[in-house]
Amino acid sequence: MIIHNVRILGGEPVDIRIADGVVAEVGTGLTGGEVIDGQGAVALPGLVDLHTHLREPGREDAETVLTGTQSAARGGYTAVHAMANTSPVADTAGVVEQVWRLGREYGLCDVHPVGAVTVGLDGRQLAELGAMADSAARVRVFSDDGKCVSDAVLMRRALEYVKAFDGVVAQHAQEPRLTEGAQMNEGVVSGRLGLTGWPAVAEEAIIARDCLLAAHVGSRLHVCHVSTAGSVEILRWAKSKGWNITAEVTPHHLLLTDDLVEESPAGAYNPIYKVNPPLRTRADVEALRAALADGTIDVVATDHAPHPVEDKETEWSAAAMGMVGLETALSVVQEAMIDTGLLDWAGVADRMSAAPARIGRLAGQGRPIEPGSPANITLYDPSVRTEVDPSAFASKSRNTPYTGMTLPGRVVATFLRGKPTVLEGKLA
C-alpha cells in the first residue's frame, strides 16, 4: 500500500509505503501496490489515549469495547487505555484480561486495560496489582479514576508496589471531604446559580501531596485531568525538582468554561456541561493551554465518559458527570492549540501520541512515521470546518458538549499496523 500526497507533521508532501504492517519507505513519486490518495492531509502517528471509559463489562447500555474502539478509530486513535470503573471493577487479572481480549477480537485499536488501585475502588485495600501486571493484559497503568485514592498511606503503598514492574499510578485528584455534594466549579457562577461548589483546592491539595509521596518513594505518578491554574503551578514546581511526575489535560478543559452552566445556548443548568473535575474559569483554561504548550502538562487525554440519554437528560443534581470526547478531541485541540499558535503539529504528535505511549509503556505506539516503525498513522485535514452532529458518532452515547458547534478539521483515515480502520472519515 502507498499513501500518496500527505504531509508528515504538516511538512512537505510525501508518499508513505506500507508493507507487512510497518512503514517501509517515505519519499516522493513512490509507485506499486494499492494507492490511497492522502489529498495533502497532515499525517500524524496514531493517537494514543491514556484515559478512556469503555464501560464494558457492566454498562453496555452506555458503551462497549466495540463501539468505544469504533469511536476511537473515528477520532484517529490507534490505542486507548480503558479505565477500571466497570462492573465488575477491573481489579483482578480476570477482568483486565476480559477487556484486553475483547479489544483484540475487534481489532479497531489496541485496548490496554487500566487496573484499579484498590479493591472495588473503595480506597481500603490494594487490588491485585502484581497479578494484573503479570496477566496477558500486561497492565502498567493503575487508577481508581472516578474516585481519589485519598488515604495517604494506601497511596504510598501503591506507589511503592508498582515500582517492581515499572508501573504508574494515575490519580484522580479530588479531596473527597472538600467536594461532598459538589455540582460544579466553586466560584462566581456557582454562587449565582446556587449550586454546591467543587473548589480548586480540592484538586491542588491531592496533587501536592502525591507529588511529595512519589518523590519520597522514587516512583512514577501520573495526574489525571488537571483542571486548575494552581495545579499547573504545583506540577511545574514538582517537575523542576526532577521528580517522575506526568500529567494530562482533557480537550474540554482546554476550551470550555464554567460560564456555560449559566449561559449555554439551551439555557442554564444544562447537565451536558456537568463533568468531574468541573469546567473551570477562563483564567484556568489559559493556564492549562500554556502548560500544555511548555510541557508542564505532558498529554491530552479525552476522559471519554459515555452515558445513556436518561442519565444526562434529567435535572442537574441527578445527572451523571462526564462527556464523550474521542471523536472530537483532535478538532478541539486544533481549535485551542494549533489555531492559536500555541502548538505545531509536531507538538500535537508528542502530546497525543508519543508522550501517552511512553507513559503507558506501549512500545509499538507513538513512534515517528519513518521506515521501520509500525504503520500506526492518522491522516487529518485541518482545512475544513464542520458542525458537530452527535447522531453521526460511532459511540453509543451522545453526551457531547459540542452539539451544534462548528469545529475545525476532520480525521480522513486511520491505520492500525497498516490496516485501515477508517477511510474517508468512515469506518473501513
Image: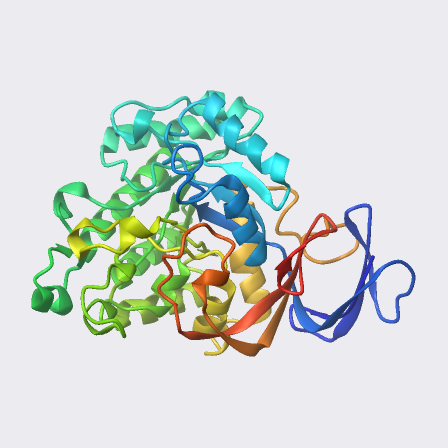
Front in this rendered view, residue 203 or 294: 203
Q: Please provide percent x and percent y for residue 154.
A: 28, 28
Q: Is residue 388 left or right of residue 9?
A: left
Q: Quadrant of residue 20?
A: top right
Q: Going 53% across and 27% down the picture, which residue do you hit?
A: 97
Q: Is residue 48 above or below residue 85?
A: below
The answer to whether residue 102 of the structure is visible from this angle is: yes
Q: Please provide percent x and percent y for residue 139.
A: 51, 31
**How many discs appear?**
0
Q: Going 18% across and 49% down the picture, which residue do you hit?
A: 318
Q: Is residue 94 above or below residue 261?
A: above
Q: Please provide percent x and percent y for residue 280.
A: 25, 64
Front in this rendered view, residue 208 or 324: 324
Q: Quadrant of the C terminus?
A: bottom right
The answer to whether residue 183 of the structure is visible from this angle is: no
Front in this rendered view, residue 49 or 213: 49
Q: Is residue 266 above or below residue 423?
A: below
How did the renderer colour the structure? rainbow
Q: Quadrant of the N terminus?
A: bottom right
Q: Please provide percent x and percent y for residue 203.
A: 24, 51
Q: Is residue 59 left or right of residue 375?
A: left
